[in-house]
Image (tube, rainbow, N blue to C red):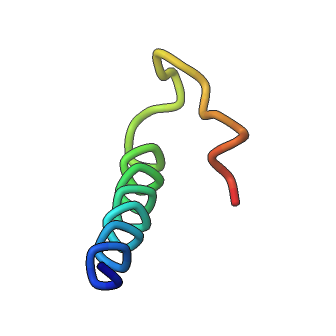
Amino acid sequence: MTAAVAIGIGVLILAALAYDIARLITPAESRYPPPASARF
């Protein structure tokens, strides 16, 4: 069970990193503004 929780947290962190990188690469005019709540 602990391994599953650790994997889930790792996947969430990787998804957040990929989202940030993709947002930096893509042009500023996005369909929706970045949610402020996603910032840790």
- How many marks do you count on the picture? 0
Q: Give residue 40's quadrant in the image.
A: bottom right
- Asked if residue 1 lies left or right of residue 35, the reply is left
Quick check: 31 above or below 23? Answer: above
Considering every residue shown, the one lying at the far front of the view is 1
Residue in the foreground of this view, choosing between 22 and 7:
7
The x and y percentages for residue 9 are 41, 70
Q: Position of residue 12 (x, y in %)?
A: 40, 61
Give the image location of residue 33, x and y in percent: 60, 25
Instruction: Identify the residue at horizontal 64%, vertical 34% (top origin).
Output: 35
Q: Position of residue 19 (x, y in %)?
A: 40, 49
**Residue at 43% of width from left, 67% of height from top?**
13
User: Measured along the vertical axis of the image, is residue 12 above or below residue 24?
Assistant: below
Relative vertical location of residue 40 with respect to residue 1 in this rendering, above or below: above
Say whether residue 2 is left or right of residue 28. left
Q: Quadrant of the N terminus?
A: bottom left
- Of residue 35 and residue 24, the one placed in the foreground of this image is 35
Residue at screen point 68% across, 53% down: 39
Residue lying farthest to the bottom in this orientation: 3
Which residue shows up at 45% across the image and 57% down it?
16
Q: Based on the displayed image, in which of its 4 quarters is residue 2 positioned? A: bottom left
- Report the residue that reaches farthest toward the top: 31
